[in-house]
Amino acid sequence: MSRSMFARNPSVLVFLAILGLFTLGVTLMSEWAGSEIVSTSFVKTLGKTLCLALVAVAMDLVWGYAGILSLGHFAFFGLGGYMIGMWLMYERTHGIVASSLAEATIPPTESEIAGAIGNQIFGVVGSSEFPAIWAFADSLALQLLFVVLVPGLFAFVFGWLAFRSRVTGVYLSILTQAMTLALALYLFQNDSGLRGNNGLSGLQNLPGLDHVPQSSISIWFFWASAGALALGYAFSAWIVSGKFGSVIRGIRDNESRVRFLGYPVEAYKLFVFTVTAMIAGIAGALYYPQAGIINPAEVAPIASIYLAVWVAIGGRGRLYGAVIGAAFVSLVSSWFTGGQAPDVNLGFYTIRWVDWWLVLLGLSFVAVTLLAPKGIGGLLDHWTGRLAPDRHGADLGPDSGSLREAEAEQ
């Protein structure tokens, strides 16, 4: 990673330093370290929040910088979770079945063990046969590879078909939402091979580590989530800091002009769409072992809409804004829906925040859109003096929106 990237984005070093101090602080205050100031369940909540921040960074890269409002990026997040979930569920079930059958008078054959595993996993949907998509579920290396390849391939095929047809704007958003809905409906079916509405469960139990307490496992995943967010943030900042970043911002602002200048617009958009899908898949693979379960509802269109709301609240076009938005909404949501927020008795009606949280989130989105269109990140820029250059001097182009003299000198 070059110096120029840090020179153009000094906020990257600030973000990485804050993230490092945050990770160290949580570690020292966790039950794993013996202080028990931060509970194991809250460490998991923080780890999941870091994963949501990572997928928000991916969403900001594709929407805030490239101008592609994807309402389907949480589907890639879910696909990453399903890929690692298959290995976790298979290996955990294999261990349980193998230890149970080992007590039999006649040692079981491999086919008998496989049949028992299939019955344990798929008996809930009336089957005992392994679907073809589970062919490599016993290989951690391959499933980790699929965490990146499956969302990436899915996004590449969809993006290639959409961008080559030059579908843009609201029509592209509708297509991404339709893609997500189709995937969710498919996963809800019992014959999808992923247990239908039951999803994959027990993912918090790592195979072969039954003797390890959850306090240790939670902190390991917290470290992994923090590391993934640091790498994903730095990688995204590197992309947007150079010429590539200037081109995708140009595509966002005026796609026709960039195409006229000779840039392969569709290739740039396809690259960003595919890479951000891979980042989302990695975030999902780290999130769901901490959540413990994944089901088709996680990839429903509404989840992707929430993702766009997080980025909008945090500040679109600012990577740190995406992190702020996702972290803010995630932690506040956990507080309101976890029963920690006290009910408000108005006499004639009692406000229970579990029921009213989504309404509050919607009102927050409307308030930010009207009162602070640049989001929380924009307010942070204002408070810290990180403002855009003033547009003084003569126009350096054919219209009033062109680069101006004062900017060209910087």
Image: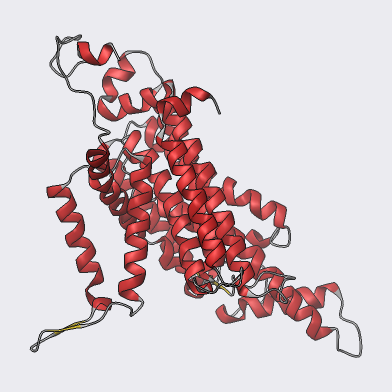
Give whichever of 36, 92 is nearer the camera. Answer: 36
Does 221 appear above or below 56? below
Q: Is residue 339 left or right of residue 197?
A: left
Q: Position of residue 328 (x, y in %)?
A: 33, 58
The residue located at (33%, 45%) in the rendering is 321
Q: Quadrant of the C terminus?
A: top left
Q: Nearer the viewer, residue 258 or 178?
A: 258
Q: Residue at left 18%, top 44%?
A: 373
Can residue 154 be seen here? The reply is: no
Q: Position of residue 371 (x, y in %)?
A: 13, 48
Which residue is drawn at the image coordinates 47% and 70% (left, top)?
42
Q: Quadrant of residue 367?
A: bottom left
Q: Can residue 182 be seen in the rendering of this structure?
A: yes
Residue 94, above or below 2: below
Q: Quadrant of residue 215?
A: bottom right
Return the x and y of residue 339 as percentages of the image width and height. Answer: 33, 80
Could you say where residue 336 lies in the image, as x and y percent from the top left?
A: 30, 73
Task: Give the side of residue 348 with respect to residue 89, left or right.
Answer: left
Q: Is residue 22 left or right of residue 166?
A: right
